[in-house]
Image (cartoon, grey):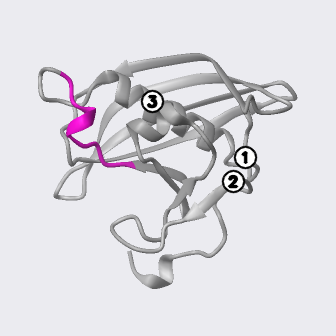
């Protein structure tokens, strides 16, 4: 990504901090408090010409006993992505996941670049429905599906902390 691709506006209005250096420069990180998600990630988000995209590069801590990325790590990234996709209209969605459906399509390795894209199916007053796909980007730049997901978020009036 060139410096001209870096936007100074957060992809979603809310609690986000821009990454200024390293491989994730130009991406944004949610700056809220989520100890489980923070321990699994870090996860990133940006908006490009195709819409909201989230990013994650799994590490050794994310692997299962078979040496591939643990399904729980993939599902945690999918949950983060669900909220980002649900907020694609521009405003951060505060709430809790009440349903989450995931289908594991293929595996991923530590160091793989994983991204997710999706769509907000419906955003009502109390429930938000979204779906998407976690993709692995190969060295040749081609994307391959790793996990498909869909879920429902129950909007919350306030956070629990």
Report the Cα–Cα distance between label 1 and label 3.
Answer: 18 Å
Visible in this render: residue 18? yes
Seen as rendered, the residue at the extreme left is: 66
Residue 12 sits in quarter: bottom right
Q: Which residue is mark 1?
A: 92
Q: Please, what secondary structure does the residue beneath circle 1 have?
A: loop
| Label 2, residues with CA under 10 Å away: few <14, some 14-19, many ≥20 | few
Image location of residue 80, percent across then percent down: 53, 37
**Magenta stretch encompasses residue 62:** yes
Task: Name which of mark 2 and mark 1 comes first in the sequence.
Answer: 2
Horizontal placement of 56 versus 59: left or right?
Answer: right
Q: Which residues are magenta?
A: 56-64
Mark 3 sits on what residue? 76
Whether the residues at callouts 2 and 1 have beta carbons within 8 Å, the answer is yes
Which of disc 3 and disc 1 is earlier in sequence? 3
Question: Could you say which disc has been placed on residue 15 in the image?
Answer: 2
How much space separates mark 2 and mark 1, taking CA atoms? 8 Å
In the displayed structure, 149 sits above or below 110; it is: above
Extreme residue in the bottom direction:
4
Q: Residue at x 36, y 29 (%)?
A: 73
For the N terminus, the image quarter is bottom left
Instruction: Using the image, determine if residue 117 lies above or below residue 1.
Output: above
Q: In the rendering, at what x and y percent does residue 156 appear?
A: 80, 28
On the question of residue 132 being in view, the answer is no
Quadrant position of the C terminus in the picture: top right
């Amino acid at each position: 990504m060139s410096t001209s691709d870096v936007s100074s506006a957060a992809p979603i209005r809310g609690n986000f901090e821009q990454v200024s250096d390293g491989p994730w420069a130009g991406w944004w990180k949610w700056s809220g408090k989520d100890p489980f998600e923070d321990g699994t990630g870090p996860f990133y988000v940006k908006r490009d010409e195709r819409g909201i995209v989230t990013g994650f590069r799994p590490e050794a801590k994310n692997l299962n006993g078979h040496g591939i990325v643990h399904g729980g790590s993939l599902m945690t990234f999918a949950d983060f992505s669900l909220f980002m996709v649900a907020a694609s209209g521009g405003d951060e969605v505060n709430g809790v996941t009440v349903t989450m459906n995931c289908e594991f399509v293929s595996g991923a390795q530590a160091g793989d670049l994983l991204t997710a894209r999706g769509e907000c199916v419906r955003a009502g007053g109390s429930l938000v429905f979204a779906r998407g796909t976690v993709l692995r980007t190969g060295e040749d730049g081609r994307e391959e599906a790793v996990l498909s997901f869909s879920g429902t978020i129950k909007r919350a009036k306030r956070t629990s902390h």
